Image (tube, grey):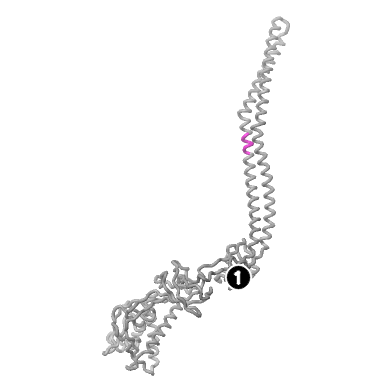
């Protein structure tokens, strides 16, 4: 690599120019890093790259310009994020007791337990009160249900008793009365005939004849009465009585059904309370590590002694340590480049592992002050089994989103952006010359050159410091005007990144 050597005495102005060079290198990155952590990583990378390039510069040529020789090589583009290690499969230990009950004791987070070990004890006082109360109501309801059951049986028998017994008896009684009335009428008529014969022979007076005629009339009316009573009984009384008895039976059955359901409900509540008593002591369904779930401070605090828990609340987690992953947030500016299956380097406190992107969220939670107004998408990176991983470990991930082989690259510190155009200054025998570039992807330190440079060209790494005096014809001569133009270009790049 042919380079220029930096003189030992570099003034304050040169140091200021170097800082501007590093800042412009960050602004020229084609991958916008919105996250503060990512920006710091990129800045550190730029400083390291410049230091490395400066350390290998040739000492054969003298001069204040730092240069870099354009060469072909490989370029890897990564997305760096911070995250926490967690398990992809967790056994949730939930509260199975109704209401809000106090925790008497809970196992410490990070404890290794065996199958059947106690994990949580919940205060059963509320359940005992519920059992006593529900037992009393269950007895009352059952008593009412038994009473109405007897009423249903009695009403059912009443219907059969009337239709098959009492009604038939009434019909027979009316028919008997009709037969008697008809016989009485026949007797009265015979007596009337005999009286008339006796009256013609002057043995009986006319008064006795009239008396016999009146008896016949009375017997006729009695026969009509008995016939009418029989007709009313068969045509109307039976239907009316049947409807009345049937309605009473339905009413009693409905009352009994309500009482039976009430008794069943009260008994069910009592039995459920009895069953829930066993859930006041929660035991481990399997052996393994037990941890407390993370809880946001504005939603709920950690579960400890005295905390009131509700039904189906997750109190503990038992992670599967053979299926670990890292959960990171990928910024919205690059999330479209992160795909499932991409490789990632995961750096832990004492080791570095190879991971794979297993999932990328399609939606994200709303951003706010609690996320520094940054929109990040949850991304899961699966890790190999073993290695003694534990939930909660911090990790730094680098997801490889692109890889280029045998391409021309240029340091981002050598590029100046002006609007939509990118330029660099090439060191030639006649002095520095400006070149317009067509650039490609970037990893924050180097960028792919698609057009504008050839292998072996030497580009100036601090173009801002030397572009003004050497390109006076094409750039503003006044230093303040040039500075304002560069600031405007930086703002334009920042707006485009946002």
Mark 1 is surrounded, within 10 Å at the Cα level, by few (under 14), some (14 to 19) or many (20 or more) other residues, namely some
67 or 418: nearer the viewer:
67
213 or 69: nearer the viewer:
69
Indicate yes or no whether the magenta region holds residue 420. no
Figure quadrant of residue 477? bottom left
Number of numbered labels in the structure image: 1
Figure quadrant of residue 195? top right
Q: Quadrant of the C terminus?
A: bottom left
Q: Secondary structure at mark 1?
A: strand
Q: Quadrant of the N terminus?
A: bottom left
Figure quadrant of residue 96? bottom right
301 or 479: nearer the viewer:
301
Q: Residue drawn 39% across and 71% down? A: 337
Vertically, is 439 above or below 60?
Answer: above
Vertically, is 125 above or below 28?
Answer: above
User: Residue 2, position in %: x, y?
Assistant: 32, 89
User: Residue 218, position in %: x, y?
Assistant: 68, 18
Q: Residue drawn 60% across and 64% down? A: 95
User: Residue 377, position in %: x, y?
Assistant: 45, 70
Q: Residue furthest top?
A: 201
Taking the image as shown, residue 24 lies to the left or right of residue 140, namely: left
Q: Is residue 101 visible?
A: yes
Q: Residue furthest left?
A: 430
Q: Which residues are drawn in magenta?
A: 242-247
User: Residue 265, position in %: x, y?
Assistant: 63, 52
Which residue does the numbered mark 1 point to in the structure image?
A: 113
């Amino acid at each position: 690599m042919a380079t220029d050597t930096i003189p030992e005495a570099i003034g304050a102005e040169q140091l200021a120019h170097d800082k501007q060079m590093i800042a412009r290198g960050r602004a020229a990155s084609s991958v916008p890093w919105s996250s503060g952590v990512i920006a710091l990583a990129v800045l550190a990378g730029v400083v390291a790259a410049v230091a490395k390039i400066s350390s290998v510069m040739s000492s054969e040529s003298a001069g204040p310009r730092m240069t870099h020789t354009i060469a072909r090589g490989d370029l890897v583009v990564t997305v760096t994020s911070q995250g926490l290690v967690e398990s992809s499969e967790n056994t949730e230990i939930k509260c199975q007791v109704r209401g809000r009950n106090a925790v008497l004791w809970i196992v410490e987070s990070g404890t290794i337990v065996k199958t059947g070990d106690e994990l949580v004890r919940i205060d059963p006082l509320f359940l005992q009160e519920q059992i006593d109360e529900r037992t009393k109501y269950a007895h009352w309801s059952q008593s009412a249900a038994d009473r109405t059951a007897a009423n249903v049986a009695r009403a059912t028998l009443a219907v059969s008793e009337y239709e098959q017994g009492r009604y038939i008896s009434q019909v027979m009684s009316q028919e008997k009365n009709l037969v008697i009335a008809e016989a009485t009428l026949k007797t009265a008529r015979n007596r009337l005939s005999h009286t008339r014969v006796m009256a013609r022979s002057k043995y009986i007076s006319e008064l006795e004849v009239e008396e016999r005629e009146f008896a016949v009339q009375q017997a006729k009316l009695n026969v009509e009465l008995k016939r009418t009573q029989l007709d009313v009984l068969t045509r109307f009384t039976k239907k009316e009585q049947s409807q009345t008895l049937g309605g009473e039976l339905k009413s009693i059955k409905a009352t009994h059904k309500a009482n039976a359901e009430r008794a069943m409900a009260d008994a069910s509540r009592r039995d459920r309370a009895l069953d829930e008593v066993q859930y006041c002591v929660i035991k481990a369904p399997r052996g393994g590590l037990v941890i407390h779930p993370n809880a946001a401070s504005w939603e709920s605090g950690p579960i400890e002694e005295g905390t009131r828990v509700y039904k189906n609340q997750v109190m503990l987690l038992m992670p599967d340590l053979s299926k670990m992953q890292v959960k990171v947030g990928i910024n919205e500016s690059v999330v479209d480049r992160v795909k499932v299956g991409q490789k990632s380097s995961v750096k832990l406190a004492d080791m570095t592992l190879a991971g794979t992107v297993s999932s990328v969220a399609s939606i994200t939670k709303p951003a706010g002050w609690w996320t520094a107004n940054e929109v990040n998408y949850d991304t899961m990176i699966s890790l190999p089994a073993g290695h003694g991983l534990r939930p909660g470990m911090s990790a730094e991930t680098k997801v490889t989103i692109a890889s280029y082989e045998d391409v021309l690259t240029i340091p981002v510190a050598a590029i100046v952006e002006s609007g939509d155009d990118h330029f660099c200054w090439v060191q030639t025998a006649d002095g520095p010359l400006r070149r317009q570039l067509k650039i490609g992807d970037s990893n924050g330190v180097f960028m792919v050159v698609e057009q504008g440079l050839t292998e072996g060209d030497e580009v100036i790494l601090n173009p801002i410091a030397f572009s003004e005096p050497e390109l006076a014809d094409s750039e503003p001569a006044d230093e303040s005007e040039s500075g304002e133009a560069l600031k405007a270009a930086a703002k334009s790049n920042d707006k485009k990144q946002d």
